[in-house]
Amino acid sequence: MKKDAGLDFNPTPRKDSFMRSFVALSALMLAGSALSGEIKGKVTPVKGSAGGIVVYVVKADGQFNPPKKPAAMDQKHMAFVPYVLPVLAGTTVLFQNHDTVAHNVFSPDGAGYNLGTFPPGQSRKQEFKDTGIYTQLCSLHPEMEGYIVVLQNPYFATTKADGSFDIKGVPNGDYQLRAIGKAIKKKDRKRDFPVTVSGSTHADMDFSQQ
């Protein structure tokens, strides 16, 4: 077959251009993934269960938008569930009552709030704008206690039964880790554990070592 006069049919440049674009995009994706990592480790309390402990990054660069969907803290079996609930600043928490009796929710921390008493099957909401640790109490049942930890960033995790944790998506850099849970003494809640994140990074938190 004859080529049309004046036409130089050569598909190679288009193919080469596509390949260059593909390589450039792949490099950008790899570079982006290289800028963030994860923090894996294990929490060892002085005594008590190592499970259910919240581990979090104290401060990280950037502005973070809270989720639109409320977080939830339940009241059942005469206890706040979970015992510690980590949330990003600006998050609304839905307090549920799945117990067989009426409950109340109030906190003396921060500006303080009292959501009143509500029967089984009902719920109340509270927005947490400021960072900090908020004790959750029930005026009807003084033995009940829980905590909401309001954080500046979304880099946190809850330990498994063996104390292990994995905080994903943490940008490379220097940070301080803290922990809060039933087995963590009050004086240790502000104990900092420094960690330098570079890809997948290991960092243990041993509270038995003072």
Image: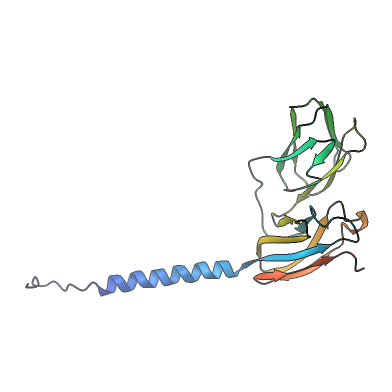
The residue most toward the top is: 119
In this orientation, does residue 161 appear? yes
In this orientation, does residue 61 appear? no
Residue 145 is drawn in which quadrant?
top right
Residue 170 is drawn in which quadrant?
bottom right
The quadrant the N terminus occupies is: bottom left
Q: In this view, does 208 lie to the left or right of 204?
A: right
Colouring chosen for the image of the structure: rainbow
Q: Which of 7 and 116 is in front in this view?
A: 116
Q: Which of 185 and 91 is in front in this view?
A: 185
The quadrant the C terminus occupies is: bottom right
Residue 112 drawn at (x, y percent):
86, 38
Q: Is residue 46 above or below residue 115?
A: below
Q: Which residue is drawn at 70% across and 57% down?
A: 155
Residue 153 drawn at (x, y percent):
71, 55
Residue 32 drawn at (x, y percent):
56, 67
Residue 17 is drawn in which quadrant?
bottom left
Q: Which residue is drawn at 54% across and 70% down?
A: 31
Q: In this view, does 129 lie above or below 196?
A: above
Q: In this view, does 6 lie to the left or right of 116?
A: left
Q: Which of 3 and 100 is in front in this view?
A: 100
Q: Residue at x 69, y 60 (%)?
A: 167
How many numbered tags mark residues here? 0
Residue 169 drawn at (x, y percent):
64, 61
The residue most toward the left is: 2
Q: In this view, does 7 lie above or below 87?
A: below
